[in-house]
Image (cartoon, rainbow, N blue to C red):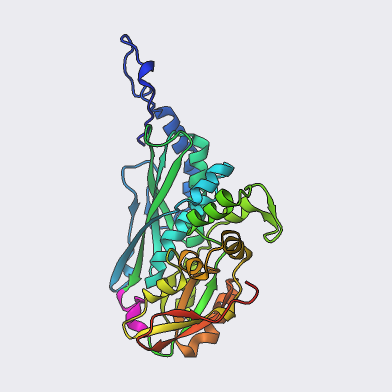
């Protein structure tokens, strides 16, 4: 672990001897953080993991007997400015779930099973309990995704970050059988688009949400919001739903053509990424009502619908494109797994772009 922190030049006298600690590096705090996070990391394991936390590299034995032609998939992501809310509330044990969700739900789009994740935590100053809380969330997210937390890095960046600042990112690796890979080449005219409901804002659009709610309207994070039934801070920190296991279960039971993870860019743009040339999707806004947080942002910030829909997930965190014959089966699988799901639209042959039609009820 590389821990760094600066001190003012005036603190150094002619007779002072420069040390790593005097430069702001606390090896002791770094070691304490590692010890505190080990129990959480140990909860996110798979049988293929070799060794434990603390080595120079994480080791994962790929079981080649499971696949005829395995294809590895990799994804790297972060959490964005949702971290500012966690910092303001001094609550750091859920933001790691968001990180895992952003990584593993990108992997599963092609049908890949998440195998392991490694994290990177950059801090202005190592506070062992805070680092452990961050890793706790990451470990919990890995358990929800069925992947291992294989290790990571925590680095202090004095002079570049404030003492209380931090940022996190992660890289995940998954595997899929070559013959079972999902993607645009599988999509057909007449396929049906199924929506999987989101748990809230997830981890996208927080710069706009914070600007509208906190900067323009001066809403306190600790204030109770009647529409939410809880405080604004609790709503904004609601962890991102992790769909990886649900998507893999669905793909095992139904004819899934592809998935689309609805993140930055919104519903239409992300779905268009997994459709082949010549096909588009027609999506019906009338099939669902976005959660109150979306309406609040739109109303308080006078944000146009087009801007809302290209910034936020609007209540849909993942979509599945399935064979029309397997719609009922798909909905039954997702319902049994307690995932809110509904028919959102269908794929058609046209030169038009993927788009939404109609209006949301009660929005």
Q: In this view, does 262 lie above or below 326?
A: above
Q: 132 or 193, which is in the foreground?
A: 193
Number of residue marks: 0
Q: Horizontal and vertical percent for residue 140?
A: 52, 53
Q: Nearer the viewer, residue 250 or 202?
A: 202
**Which quadrant, please, contains the N terminus?**
top left
Q: Main secondary structure of the magenta part?
A: helix
Residue 40 visible? The answer is no
Give the residue at x 49% y 45%: 134
| Residue 352 picture location, percent across and down | 38, 84
> Measured from the top left, where is residue 336 in percent x and y?
60, 75
- Residue drawn at x 60%, y 65% is 295
**Location of residue 334 (image quadrant):** bottom right
User: What range of the chain is rendered magenta?
Assistant: 178-187
Residue 192's place in the image compared with 319, above or below, is: below
Quadrant in which the C terminus is drawn: bottom right
In front of the other: 180 or 100: 100
Task: Pinpoint residue 288: horizontal percent, then vertical percent.
Answer: 59, 76
Q: Which residue is drawn at 39% across and 83% down?
A: 280
Residue 360 in view of the camera: yes
Q: Which residue is drawn at 47% across and 60% down?
A: 101
**Magenta run includes residue 151:** no
């Amino acid at each position: 672990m590389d821990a760094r922190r600066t001190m003012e030049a005036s603190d150094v006298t002619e007779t002072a001897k420069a040390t790593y600690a005097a430069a702001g590096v606390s090896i002791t705090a770094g070691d304490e953080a590692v010890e505190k996070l080990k129990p959480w990391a140990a909860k996110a394991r798979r049988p293929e993991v070799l060794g434990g936390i603390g080595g120079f590299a994480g080791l994962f034995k790929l079981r080649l007997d499971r696949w005829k032609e395995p294809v590895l998939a990799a994804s790297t992501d972060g959490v964005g400015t949702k971290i500012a809310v966690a910092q303001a509330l001094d609550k750091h044990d859920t933001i790691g779930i968001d990180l895992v969700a952003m990584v593993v739900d990108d992997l599963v789009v092609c049908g890949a099973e998440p195998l392991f994740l490694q994290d990177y935590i950059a801090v202005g100053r190592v506070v062992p309990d805070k680092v452990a809380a961050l890793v706790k969330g990451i470990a919990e997210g890995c358990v929800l995704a069925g992947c291992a937390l294989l290790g990571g890095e925590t680095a202090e960046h004095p002079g570049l970050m404030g003492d209380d600042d931090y940022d996190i990112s992660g890289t995940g690796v998954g595997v899929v059988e070559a013959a079972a890979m999902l993607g645009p080449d599988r999509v057909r005219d007449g396929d049906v688009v199924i929506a999987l409901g989101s748990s809230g804002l997830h981890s996208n659009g927080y710069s706009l949400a914070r600007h509208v709610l906190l900067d323009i309207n001066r809403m306190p994070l600790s204030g109770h919001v009647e529409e939410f039934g809880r405080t604004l801070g609790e709503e904004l920190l609601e962890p991102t739903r992790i769909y990886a296991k649900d998507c893999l279960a669905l793909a095992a039971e139904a004819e899934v053509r592809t998935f689309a993870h609805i993140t930055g860019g919104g519903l239409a743009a992300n779905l268009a990424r997994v459709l082949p040339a010549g096909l588009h999707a027609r999506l019906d806004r009338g099939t669902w009502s976005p959660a109150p947080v979306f309406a609040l942002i739109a109303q308080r910030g006078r944000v146009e619908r087009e801007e809302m829909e290209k910034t936020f997930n609007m209540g849909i965190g993942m979509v599945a494109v399935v064979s029309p014959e397997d719609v009922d089966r798909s909905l039954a699988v997702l319902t049994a797994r307690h995932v809110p799901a509904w028919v959102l639209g269908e794929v058609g042959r046209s030169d038009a772009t993927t788009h939404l039609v109609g209006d949301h009820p009660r929005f």
